[in-house]
Image (tube, rainbow, N blue to C red):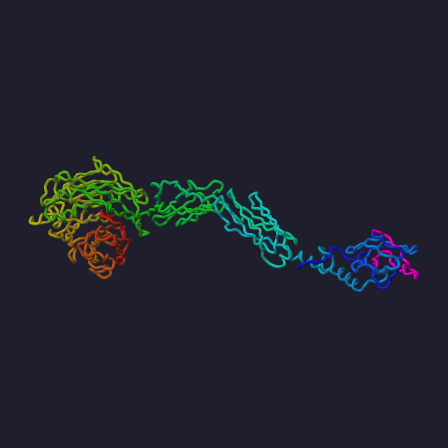
C-alpha cells in the first residue's frame, strides 16, 4: 500500500487563519527589499489584523504578471500603521508598488478558519504522520494503526533449501532462499565458522504483493572443506522486521564411506580356523571380533550392526558371538555406521562352517581330473540340515592303476570293481563334529605284477577337512595285499578277506584274514581254512567262474552289531548276479572265527547294488525301488517296499539321462546307523536318494557335487 502522509501535521502556525474583505491602502511606496510597509487606514481596520499572517499588495498599473505580490509578516504596529518583518512568498517577483494606488489585502484573519483548511487539518490529524507506529491495536491515527498491522503481518519469514544435504568434501552446497514476504537483507551462517551477507534495495509494497521472494533473492553457494554435520542459519530482514531460521544438522559433509571391514575369530578347542573360515561344532559359541573397521579420518565408526542367521542376538559392539544348532555354511554381514551417517556393509560369505555332530561324508574325485593320480575331495552333508557344503579345503591325492587288468576276461567289469575296491570307516566312537577322524583306504594297484599291489591308508579329519598318513603296522600308510578284497568295518577293527591270491592270478582267493586295529592301527592275520566255513561257505575260498569266462568275484559287505555280512555274485559274464549271502560268527575277543552261508537274496536278479545295515536288518538296494531286507533277528529275507520300478521310485530318478532306470546302474551307499540309508547313483548327480526304514519310503535329496564317486560314510 503506497504511503503519502506528511512528515508533520498542519497547525494554526502553517495553515494561517483566513477571512475575506480586510483591506487597507499603501501609504508610502514599496521598494523591492523593504521589510516594512506603511498603510493608510481611516477606518481603523488594521486593528483587526492578526499579529502574523499573509498580505497581498495589489495594483492595476503594472503588467498582469506582477500586479500582485504576497508577503508573510510577523508583526503589526497598529499605532503607526506599519506591517513588520515582511518575507516575500516564493513564486512572486519582488517589484515596486505605488502608494495610494496599491491595496493591501489581509487574507488571514484571527477569528475564523477557512472551511476547506479546517477539513484538511481534521483529515491530517486523523490520518497521522508518515512512519508512526502504534503501540496497541485499534488505537491512534490511521498511520499508526496501519503500521501496527504491517509490523504484525509483513515481517519476513526465513526459509531455505539446498540442492543436496550430504556429499563428500569438498562439498559445494547451493542454498536457495525460500523466505516469505520479500526480505531484502540476508545473513547466512553456514555452521562451519563462515558467513555470507547480501543486501538489496527494498521495493516498496513488495511484501504486500507476494508470498514468495521475488528477485533479487538470497541464494548463495558455500564449500564445506571439513567433514562434519553442520547447522545452517538464515536471518532475513525487510522494513517490517527480522526473522531467523536455524536447521540443525542440515548439511553433512563426509569423507568417503568406510573401507571394507575385516573380522577375525578367536577359536575355542571345539573350533578350527582354516584361512578366513572358522569351522565349529553345533551349539558351540563362536567369538567374532572386528579386526579393522575401515573408518576414515575425521569420521569414526559409531556403531556396528551384525547380520548372522544364528540362534543369538547381536548387539552394537565390535565383538559378538554366534551359535548354531543346525550345520551348514553361513554368511556374516557387518554394517559399520559412522558418526556422520556414512556406512559400509561388508559381506563375509560362507565364513562360518558349522558341523553337525554326525555327518555324511561324500568322497568325490575332481571332475576335471584324469589319469592314474587324481585329487579326491570330501564333501560334508549335514544329516539335520540335509544340505551339501559345496566347499572343501584340502584335496587328497589318490593313485589307482588298473593297468594290470588289461587283456583279462571281463576287463571293463573288473576295472569297475577295482576302482570301487575301497572303504571309509570311523576311527573310534568320536563323531566328526566332536573332532573324530575316519580311515580312508583303497586298492592302489601296480603297473607290473600282482605282487606289488597294496592298500593305501589315509586318516581324515572331517572337522578341519585335513588328511594325514598314518602308520599301518610298521609301514607308513600302506599294507600289501592283492586287490579285490572285501572289507568289513567293525567298530574297532577293519577286516580284509579274500581277493586274488598273492602271486596266483587263478581261481583261488586269498585265505589270509588281515585285521587292522582302529585304535592302534596295528595289524594281525589268520589263515581261513576249511573248518572256518559252514553250510557251504567254503566256496568263498575260490573265485566264481568255470574257467571259460575267467574267475572273478564281486563282493558287497556290511557290518551290523557284532556280525559281518557279505554278498557275492554267483556267476560271471557281462553282468555279475549278486545273490549269495554270508555272515561271520565269533566272539567278542575273536569276532571272525567262522563264516556261514545263509539263504540267497530272493527276488529279481540283482545286477548291482549295495548292502546297508539299518537298525532292523540288512537292506540290499539297487536302482529299482525294490527292497530286499534280511532280518538278523529271524534270519530270513523279506522283499517288498515301494515295489520294483514303481512310479514312486521312478519319480526320484533323473529321467533326463538315457538308461536312468537300468538296474545295472552303480551306486554308493551308507547308513546313519539307525533307520536311514543314503543312496547316491553314479549315472547322475541328481540321483541322490534317502530311504527311511520306518515307513519304507524314498525321498530325493539335493544334487551332489559332480565327479566320480569314491564312496560315502557317516560318522
| Position in image of residue 166 (x %, y %) | 49, 48
Q: Which sits in the foreground, 124 or 621?
A: 124
| Position in image of residue 230 (x %, y %) | 54, 46
- Horizontal placement of 333 versus 586: left or right? right
Which residue is located at x 76 percent, y 60 percent? 125
Which residue is located at x 35 percent, y 50 percent? 326
Highlighted range, magenta: 33-57
| Position in image of residue 527 (x %, y %) | 14, 41
Q: Which sits in the foreground, 400 or 282?
A: 400
Where 491 falls versus 23 (above or below)? Answer: above
Q: Is residue 89 magenta?
A: no
Q: Which sits in the foreground, 471 or 465?
A: 465
Where 491 falls versus 116 (above or below)? Answer: above
Quarter holding residue 515: top left
- In this rendering, does residue 331 appear at all? yes
Quarter holding residue 114: bottom right
Q: Residue furthest left?
A: 548
- In this rendering, does residue 270 appear at all? no
Where 21 falls versus 226 (above or below)? Answer: below
Q: Residue furthest top?
A: 474
Q: How many marks?
A: 0
Where 652 falls versus 357 (above or below)? Answer: below
Which residue is located at x 14 percent, y 53 percent? 577
Q: Is residue 47 magenta?
A: yes
The quadrant of the rendering that contains the N terminus is bottom right
| Position in image of residue 286 (x %, y %) | 39, 44
Amino acid at each position: 500500500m503506497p504511503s503519502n502522509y506528511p512528515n508533520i501535521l498542519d497547525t494554526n502556525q502553517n495553515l494561517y487563519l483566513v477571512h475575506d474583505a480586510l483591506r487597507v491602502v499603501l501609504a508610502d511606496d514599496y521598494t523591492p527589499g523593504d521589510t516594512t510597509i506603511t498603510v493608510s487606514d481611516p477606518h481603523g481596520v488594521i486593528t483587526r489584523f492578526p499579529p502574523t499572517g499573509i498580505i497581498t499588495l495589489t495594483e492595476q498599473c503594472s503588467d498582469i504578471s506582477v500586479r500582485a505580490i504576497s508577503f508573510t509578516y510577523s508583526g503589526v504596529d497598529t499605532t503607526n500603521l506599519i506591517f513588520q518583518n515582511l518575507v516575500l512568498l516564493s513564486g512572486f517577483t519582488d517589484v515596486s508598488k505605488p502608494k495610494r494606488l496599491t491595496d493591501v489585502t489581509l487574507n488571514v484573519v484571527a477569528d475564523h478558519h477557512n472551511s476547506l483548511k479546517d477539513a484538511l487539518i481534521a483529515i491530517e490529524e486523523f490520518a497521522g504522520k508518515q512512519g508512526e507506529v502504534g503501540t496497541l491495536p485499534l488505537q491512534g491515527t490511521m498511520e499508526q494503526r496501519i503500521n501496527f498491522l504491517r509490523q504484525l503481518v509483513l515481517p519476513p519469514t526465513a526459509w531455505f533449501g539446498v540442492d543436496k544435504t550430504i556429499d563428500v568434501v569438498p562439498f559445494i552446497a547451493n542454498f536457495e532462499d525460500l523466505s516469505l514476504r520479500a526480505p531484502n537483507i540476508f545473513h547466512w551462517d553456514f555452521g562451519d565458522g563462515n558467513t555470507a551477507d547480501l543486501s538489496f534495495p527494498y521495493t516498496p509494497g513488495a511484501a504486500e504483493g507476494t508470498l514468495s521472494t521475488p528477485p533479487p533473492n538470497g541464494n548463495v553457494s558455500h564449500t564445506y572443506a571439513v567433514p562434519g554435520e553442520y547447522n545452517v542459519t538464515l536471518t532475513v530482514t525487510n522494513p517490517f522486521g527480522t526473522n531467523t531460521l536455524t536447521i540443525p544438522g542440515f548439511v553433512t559433509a563426509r569423507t568417503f564411506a568406510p573401507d571394507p571391514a575385516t573380522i577375525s575369530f578367536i577359536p575355542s578347542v571345539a573350533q578350527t580356523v582354516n584361512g578366513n573360515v572358522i569351522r565349529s561344532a553345533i551349539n558351540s559359541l563362536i567369538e567374532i571380533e572386528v579386526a579393522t573397521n575401515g573408518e576414515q579420518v575425521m569420521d569414526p565408526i559409531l556403531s556396528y550392526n551384525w547380520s548372522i542367521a544364528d540362534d543369538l542376538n547381536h548387539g552394537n559392539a565390535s565383538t559378538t558371538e554366534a551359535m548354531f544348532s543346525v550345520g551348514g555354511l553361513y554368511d556374516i554381514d557387518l554394517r559399520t555406521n559412522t558418526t556422520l551417517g556414512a556406512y559400509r556393509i561388508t559381506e563375509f560369505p560362507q565364513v562360518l562352517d558349522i558341523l553337525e555332530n554326525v555327518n555324511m561324508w561324500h568322497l568325490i574325485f575332481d571332475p576335471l581330473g584324469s589319469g592314474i593320480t587324481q585329487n579326491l575331495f570330501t564333501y560334508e552333508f549335514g544329516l539335520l540340515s540335509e544340505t551339501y557344503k559345496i566347499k572343501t579345503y584340502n584335496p587328497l591325492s589318490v593313485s589307482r592303476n588298473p593297468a594290470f587288468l588289461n587283456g583279462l576276461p571281463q576287463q571293463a567289469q573288473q576295472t569297475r570293481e577295482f576302482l570301487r575296491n575301497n572303504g571309509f570307516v570311523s576311527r573310534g566312537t568320536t563323531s566328526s563334529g566332536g573332532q573324530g577322524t575316519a580311515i580312508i583306504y583303497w586298492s592302489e594297484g601296480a603297473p607290473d605284477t600282482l605282487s606289488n599291489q597294496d592298500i593305501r591308508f589315509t586318516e581324515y579329519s572331517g572337522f578341519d577337512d585335513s588328511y594325514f598318513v598314518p602308520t599301518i603296522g610298521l609301514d607308513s600308510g600302506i599294507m600289501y595285499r592283492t586287490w579285490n578284497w572285501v572289507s568289513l568295518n567293525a567298530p574297532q577293527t577293519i577286516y580284509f578277506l579274500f581277493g586274488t591270491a598273492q602271486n596266483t592270478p587263478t581261481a583261488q582267493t586269498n585265505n589270509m584274514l588281515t585285521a587292522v586295529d582302529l585304535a592302534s592301527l596295528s595289524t594281525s592275520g589268520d589263515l581261513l581254512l576249511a573248518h572256518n566255513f559252514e553250510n557251504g561257505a567254503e566256496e568263498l575260498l575260490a573265485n566264481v567262474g568255470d574257467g571259460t569266462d575267467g574267475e572273478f568275484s564281486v563282493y558287497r559287505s556290511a557290518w551290523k552289531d557284532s556280525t559281518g555280512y557279505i554278498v557275492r555274485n554267483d556267476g560271471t559274464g557281462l553282468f555279475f548276479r549278486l545273490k549269495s549271502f554270508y555272515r561271520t560268527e565269533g566272539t567278542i575277543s575273536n569276532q571272525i572265527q567262522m563264516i556261514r552261508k545263509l539263504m540267497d537274496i530272493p527276488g529279481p536278479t540283482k545286477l548291482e547294488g549295495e548292502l546297508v545295515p539299518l537298525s532292523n536288518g540288512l537292506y540290499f538296494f539297487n536302482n529299482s525301488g525294490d527292497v530286499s531286507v534280511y532280518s538278523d533277528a529271524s534270519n530270513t529275507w523279506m522283499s517288498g517296499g515301494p515295489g520294483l520300478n514303481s512310479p514312486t521310485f521312478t519319480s526320484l530318478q533323473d529321467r533326463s539321462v538315457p538308461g536312468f532306470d537300468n538296474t545295472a546302474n552303480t551306486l554308493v551307499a551308507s547308513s546313519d546307523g539307525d533307520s536311514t540309508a543314503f543312496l547316491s547313483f553314479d549315472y547322475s548327480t541328481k540321483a541322490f536318494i534317502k530311504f527311511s526304514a520306518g515307513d519304507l519310503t524314498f525321498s530325493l535329496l539335493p544334487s551332489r557335487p559332480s565327479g566320480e564317486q569314491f564312496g560315502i560314510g557317516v560318522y
